[in-house]
Amino acid sequence: MLFPMYGGYGLYLLFTLPALLLGFWAQLKVQGAFKKYSQKRTVVGLSGAETARRMLDAAGLNNVRIEETGGVLSDHYDPASKVLRLSHETYRGISISAAGVAAHEAGHALQDSQGYFPLYVRSAIVPAVQIGSWLGPIIFMLGLFLSSSLGTQIAWFGILVFSATAIFAVVTLPVEFDATRRAKAWLSSSGVLYQNEMEGIHKVLDAAALTYVAAAIQAISTVLYYAFLLSGRSRRD
């Protein structure tokens, strides 16, 4: 993300520092919760892959494959290929953290199978986000440095392009919250976990949800910052 020089870093931090701090705190919280409950083995002793498989099969989603992938907390569901990809620690882990993360990702597969609209919206705008997240700030900066009405129009277009990032972050919230709700409901009633293990599930998944809230606030704050700078220049012009 580019730091527009126009207006200085102080103004940028005024708009974005709260979201940056929230994001930092959320990351610490999710890493701490995941690490703590990664060390607590479930009584039943199923791996994350086995937990996800049971949840998918219970919903009739025998066609959804589960694959092991690299990285840390790189777990995700691919709606295009109907594949649930779990990181090594989640795939093979028999911990509370592994069960929670695996069930959460399986929740996305359930959303896909049931036509959950926000999931489709998020998937549809991914290409726009991939382009807008880096191209939008560049167009905005170009417009700022052009001292003309055309420059202002270009800058507003840059904000519009970058806004796809904020829209994506906002749409992600119901998608992730709903997947968490589905995971908690299934884990608490399936017999995969004992009820006294659900406290760890709540802490791991709630901490993860907070990171999405922080990302949405940060994206919105950046859009507002760009708009504030451009509005200030328009008033001076």
Image: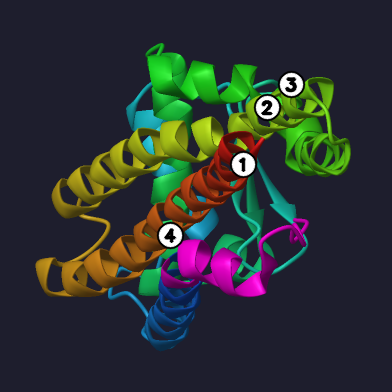
The residue labelled by disc 1 is 236
Tag in front: 2 or 1: 1
What whole-number distance in Å separates the C-alpha atoms at marks 2 and 3? 5 Å
Q: What segment is highlighted magenta in the picture?
A: 1-18
* Image quadrant where residue 153 sits: top right
Q: Which residue is drawn at 77% across and 43% down?
A: 137
The circle on residue 153 is 3
Q: Which amino acid lies under the numbered mark 3 shown in the image of this protein?
A: Gln
Instruction: Report the Cα–Cα distance between label 4 and label 3.
Output: 30 Å
3 and 1 marks in contact (CB < 8 Å): no
In the image, which is nearer the foreground, mark 4 or mark 3?
Answer: 3
Residue where numbered disc 4 is placed: 214
Spatial separation of the CA atoms under disc 2 and disc 1 = 16 Å
Q: Which amino acid does label 1 sit on?
A: Arg
**SS of the residue at dot 2?**
helix
**Residue 132 located left or right of residue 229:** right
User: Which label's residue is closer to the chain start, 3 or 1?
Assistant: 3
Q: Which colour scheme is used?
A: rainbow
Give how far across and how far down residue 201 sits, in percent.
Answer: 27, 66
Q: Which of marks 1 and 4 is nearer the N terminus?
A: 4
- Residue 79 is left or right of residue 109, and the answer is right
